[in-house]
């Protein structure tokens, strides 16, 4: 643990988030001692699962100088159409579910890439458009109805656990196998960003797209890779969500973009691009998850949670922005 | 001097009917510093882009090392050893020094993986080669402009550069940094690298160049050894007209316009007093951080003084905000016209009336006719080169942009005009125009304060010069009894004193 949290591996910003998480956990634990239990760890991990996949994609996109608000709609599209196709054609295959959702995601990602990379539409506007398209298509097709009969072999995945531990009340706390997904993704993304030229090109175009072009980086190609990969991962996250929730709901992921962007920014990714780390993003997701899962325990009414998340976004972005300003004004070397 | 590295013959290039280059010849030899001089818009940038393969020439031939090049792109130019350092350096602020230096090399060699250790070693080696000292692990956003430029130079020489083109390399550098840069250029030159410096600054040309090519309106008007050009000839070739800049000496000094008494602002400047009479042009100079810019900020209410008196036409006034300053008819031409002085996406007319817009607001609506008329009068009066008042500011050259900033304030009929670096990045012709305007204004009783580190500009245009140091007035001089070299020695003396402390 000490190695991971050493000064070498953590930025000041990330340490700051760690302190907030520790303080918040202590506070929640004082009010509700039941918080300090393995079941909390499992529950939090389960809540973080889908959000962290989204957040990792969003982080890479923001590092590259873009932003994506279309992923909740795209994920909903992927999960709903995949389940619907499987039911209509009586396909009961785990592989098909993931491949199909990934392909839908790839197509939406490609659309984003074309709009942003080729037509040079600002990323926010482009992905707002895609979001509306994907969400509209899903709502038209579904009529707003959810599908609750998931093909058997796929549904069975929801009951596969990595660990299960009997808890004090005699019940069982279990950790879903799906947790492997974000964990593998974290290591993979860290490797790509830090140790491949593709990763460094992503930072470079986020730092200065024009300089990147002059240096011989194919900016458009890099953008296509980023948005298409994000599309695939969004599809996978969508179908995973359906399996875990055991239904295909066309709209319950909608609105997740705010939380995800908040998590990414709190984790130290600068909204203006060029900066961001996997560790920071995971910490950001953890903080946001703790807040949204546990504020109710602290006696904060339900509706105030949205307010609290808003507050975190405002404070989090202010801190990053003030730090950037401080760097800009600091004596130059 | 060595053999010819680059030869351009009769290069022509037009953009949609506009002839940017009308048959340019250029010969650059190995191990020489060749200045490519010319005013803004003369085709210098286009020519560089032809050499670096960004633009293909419509007609003409490009030879590198004696070989005729056909249909070459940026990557081909880089492979042949042509490296361009652009004005903005094209560095990545969010990456470390080492990564910035090594990245192009990694990209050129088609690497797939990032080797942090190797990139650090490459960077250190490149820095050693040019004698730069920077921490390879620091982010480039934390570097000074001069060091960002060093990063760009390190990066360029890694690619086995045989020709290094520097586009306006000294624009944002202090005098000291320019010296360091020139030392590095000399060093590269001694290694047999051909160097082209694009510039419109005369001091630079005489400071470093071996040979010189002057462009005007897309054609080369003169080329040859630097010793064959004296300054007046040089200016004449650049501008196409004779510019005689006599030193400004007011014919008569009238009543007092402005007086400062013991003006202070903690950590900015301390106990500053001076006075300015009708006909005076006051120059303020000093090193960065000496308080020279802060005085202007205080007078214009941006960062007001905490104590002391400001007396305008014999009456004490109080300036606590920009509104106060404007109400007292103060005008301020800021240091960075692009971010502080202009609305780049708006027309000349909009910019010209920006500070006096309330005058055009009558009966609940804006008098567009009067606005356009005012702008067009100024275009004529101060010689702004533009077909009408409609073009967007961003399409004008630096000199014309600066004239618009001045017109904006002249349209408020100011009593006091403060100019911070009035001719930075302005070419010789426009510079002379701006100086002429200032002299005329001073004669009509407008108080003029020029803040600048361009010492020749101060000696030429001011009859009083104040040298600031450490926030207070170090010395006040009458410009008829000082010279550029005296001022320079004085400023550098300050540097030595500070260093001794």
Image (spheres, coloured by chain):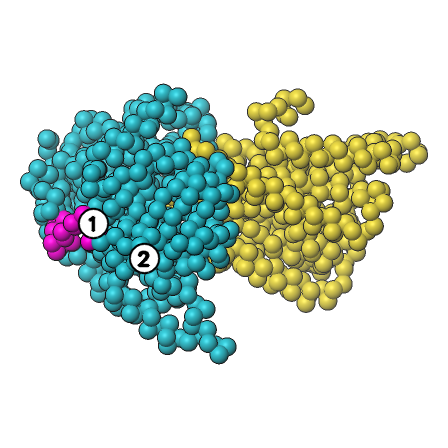
Chain colours: A yellow, B cyan
Q: Is residue A98 magenta?
A: no
Give the spatial CA distance, label 1 vs label 2: 15 Å
Whether residue A264 is visible, yes or no, is no
Q: Are marks 1 and 2 on the same chain?
A: yes
Query: Horizontally, is A5 left or right of A215 in the view?
Result: right
Q: Residues within 10 Å of mark 1 (few under 14, many from 20)?
A: many
Residue B446 has which mark? 2
Instruction: Write the start and end of the magenta stretch as one range.
Output: B235-251
Element on which disc 2 rests:
loop
Sequence-first disc among 1 and 2: 1
Where is the C terminus of chain B found, in terms of image quarters?
top left
The answer to which of A151 and B146 lies nearer the viewer is: B146
Q: Which residue is mark 1?
A: B248
Task: Estimate the x, y position of residue B379 in percent, counting from the top left.
Answer: 28, 66
Chain of the residue where label 2 is placed in the rendered structure: B
Chain of the residue where label 1 is placed in the rendered structure: B
Task: Estimate the x, y position of residue B307 in percent, counting from the top left.
Answer: 50, 42
Res A167 → quadrant: top right
Query: Horizontally, is B36 left or right of A69 in the view?
Result: left
Q: Residues within 10 Å of mark 2 (few under 14, many from 20)?
A: many
Q: Is residue B248 magenta?
A: yes
Task: Estimate the x, y position of residue B137 in percent, counting from the top left.
Answer: 46, 27
Picture residue at 12% right of the left edge, 56% below the top: B241
Q: Classify A192 as above or below A55.
A: above
Q: Residue furthest bottom?
A: B363
């Amino acid at each position: 643990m000490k190695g991971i949290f050493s000064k070498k591996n953590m930025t000041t910003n990330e340490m700051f988030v760690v302190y907030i998480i520790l303080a918040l956990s202590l506070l929640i634990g004082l009010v509700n001692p039941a918080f300090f239990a393995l079941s909390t760890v499992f529950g939090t991990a389960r809540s973080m699962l889908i959000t962290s996949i989204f957040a990792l994609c969003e982080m890479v996109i923001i590092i590259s100088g873009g932003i994506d608000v279309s992923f909740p709609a795209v994920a909903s599209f992927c999960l709903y159409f995949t389940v619907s196709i499987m039911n209509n054609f009586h396909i009961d295959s785990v592989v098909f579910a993931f491949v199909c959702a990934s392909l839908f995601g790839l197509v939406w990602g490609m659309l984003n890439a074309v709009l942003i990379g080729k037509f040079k539409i600002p990323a926010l506007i482009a992905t707002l458009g895609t979001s509306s398209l994907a969400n509209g298509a899903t709502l038209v097709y579904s009529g707003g109805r959810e599908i609750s009969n998931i093909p058997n072999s796929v549904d069975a995945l929801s009951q596969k656990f990595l660990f299960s531990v009997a808890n004090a009340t005699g019940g069982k706390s279990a950790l879903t196998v799906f947790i492997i997904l974000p964990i593998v993704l974290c290591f993979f993304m860290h490797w790509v960003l830090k140790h491949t030229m593709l990763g460094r090109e992503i930072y470079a175009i986020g730092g200065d797209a024009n300089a990147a072009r002059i240096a011989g980086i194919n900016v458009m190609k890099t953008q296509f890779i980023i948005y298409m990969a994000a599309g695939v991962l969004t599809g996978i996250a969508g179908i995973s969500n359906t399996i875990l929730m055991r239904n295909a709901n066309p709209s319950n992921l909608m609105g997740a973009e705010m939380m995800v962007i908040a998590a990414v920014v709190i984790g130290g990714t600068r909204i203006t691009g060029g900066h961001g780390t996997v560790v920071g993003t995971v910490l950001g997701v953890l903080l946001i998850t703790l807040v949204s899962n546990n504020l109710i325990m602290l006696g904060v009414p339900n509706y105030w949670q949205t307010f609290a998340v808003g507050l975190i976004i405002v404070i989090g972005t202010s801190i990053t922005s003030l730090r950037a300003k401080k760097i800009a004004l600091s004596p130059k070397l | 001097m060595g053999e010819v590295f680059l030869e351009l013959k009769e290069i022509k290039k037009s953009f949609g009917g506009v002839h940017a280059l009308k048959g340019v010849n250029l010969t650059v030899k190995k191990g020489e510093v060749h200045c490519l001089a010319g005013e803004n818009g003369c085709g210098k940038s286009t020519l560089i882009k032809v050499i670096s393969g960004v633009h293909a020439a419509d007609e003409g031939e490009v030879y590198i090392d004696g070989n005729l090049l056909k249909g070459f792109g940026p990557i081909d130019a880089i492979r042949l050893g042509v490296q361009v350092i652009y004005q903005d350096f094209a560095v990545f602020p969010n990456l470390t020094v080492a990564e910035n230096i090594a990245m192009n090399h990694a990209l050129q060699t088609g690497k797939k993986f990032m080797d942090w250790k190797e990139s650090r070693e490459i960077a250190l080696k490149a820095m050693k080669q040019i004698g730069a000292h920077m921490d390879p692990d620091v982010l480039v956003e934390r570097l000074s402009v001069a060091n960002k430029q060093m990063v760009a130079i390190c990066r360029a020489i890694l690619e086995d550069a045989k020709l290094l083109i520097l586009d306006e390399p000294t624009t944002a550098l202090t005098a000291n940094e320019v010296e360091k840069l020139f030392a590095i250029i000399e060093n590269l030159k001694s290694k047999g690298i051909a160097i082209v410096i694009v510039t419109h600054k005369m001091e630079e040309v005489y400071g470093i160049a071996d040979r010189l090519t002057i462009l005007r309106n897309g054609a080369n008007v003169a080329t040859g050894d630097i010793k064959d050009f004296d300054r007046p000839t040089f200016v004449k070739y650049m501008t196409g007209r004779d510019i005689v800049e006599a030193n400004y000496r007011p014919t008569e000094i009238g009543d007092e316009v402005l007086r400062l008494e013991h003006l202070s602002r903690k950590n900015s400047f301390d106990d500053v007093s001076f006075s300015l009479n009708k006909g005076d042009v006051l120059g303020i100079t000093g090193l960065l951080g000496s308080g020279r810019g802060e005085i202007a900020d205080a007078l214009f209410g941006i960062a007001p003084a905490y104590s002391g008196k400001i007396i305008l036409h014999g009456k004490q006034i109080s300036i606590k905000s920009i509104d106060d300053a404007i109400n007292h008819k103060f005008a301020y031409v800021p240091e960075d016209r692009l971010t502080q002085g202009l609305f780049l996406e708006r027309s000349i007319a909009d910019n010209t009336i920006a500070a006096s817009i309330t005058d055009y607001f009558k009966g609940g609506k804006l008098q567009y006719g009067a606005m356009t008329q005012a702008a067009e009068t100024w275009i004529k009066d101060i010689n702004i080169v533009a077909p009408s008042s409609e073009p967007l500011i961003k399409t004008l050259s630096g000199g014309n942009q600066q004239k618009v900033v001045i017109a904006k304030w002249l349209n408020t009929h100011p009593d006091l005009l403060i100019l911070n670096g009035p001719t930075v990045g302005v070419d010789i012709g426009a510079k002379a125009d701006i100086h002429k305007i200032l002299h005329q204004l001073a004669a009509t009783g407008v108080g003029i304060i020029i803040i600048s580190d361009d010492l020749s500009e101060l000696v030429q245009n001011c009859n009083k010069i104040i040298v600031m140091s450490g926030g207070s007035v170090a010395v006040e001089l009458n410009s008829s009894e000082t010279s550029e070299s005296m001022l320079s020695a004085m400023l550098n003396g300050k540097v030595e004193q500070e260093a001794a402390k």
